[in-house]
Amino acid sequence: MVALKSGAWVMVGDGEKALFLENAGDEQAMNLEVVRQMEQDNPATHGQGTDRPGRLADGTGPHKSAVDDTDWHHLEKERFAKDIAERLYKAAHRGLYESLVIAAPPFVLGELRKELHKEVRARVILELDKELTNHPVHDIEKHLAAA
């Protein structure tokens, strides 16, 4: 069970939406309130790219091989993770939180780990690999209390 001090932050995010929550309660009675919300329009790859996949020559003959399409949806999730990490760094640098819980699906959590500044990493007290962005705040509180 995680005990969040008053003022601790919780970042709940995925590749398209992030909620920054602050514990307005104390260690015994968590009361998360939304501090900020970020959203990004990230349509599926087929909605972002219209080019046909490329082809490369296999050498000296007439044969060609297909090249995979760029996964624009995936790239946007990576960029959004970088934006979240930057926002967390700015807030930490201004002293807006002392401890942080991060809840995100495994892929986004991995991307965040790569992008987090050491000042932010030092404040992380729990990482939760769950998709909670579309859950109401009281459900997020229950998941954190059970972690």
Image (spheres, rainbow, N blue to C red):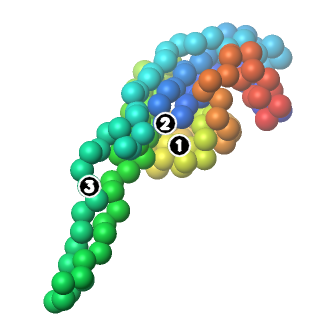
Instruction: Tell me, for residue 119, which label it has, or none.
Output: none
Instruction: Identify the amino acid type marked 2.
Output: Gly
Instruction: Tell me, for residue 108, which label it has, or none.
Output: 1
Q: Mark 2 packing: few (<14 Cα in 10 Å), some, or many (20+)? A: many
Element on which disc 1 rests: helix
- Identify which residue, 60 or 74, lies in the foreground: 60
| Separation (CA) of disc 2 from disc 1 | 6 Å
Instruction: Identify the amino acid type marked 1.
Output: Val
> Disc 3 marks which residue?
52
At a point 68% along the width and 16% down the height, the residue shown is 137
Element on which disc 3 rests: loop
Q: Residue furthest left?
A: 60
Q: Is residue 143 visible?
A: yes
Q: Quadrant of residue 44?
A: top left
Among numbered discs 1 and 3, the one appearing first in the sequence: 3
Tags 1 and 3 touching, CB below 8 Å: no
Compared to residue 16, the image places residue 55 above or below, namely: below
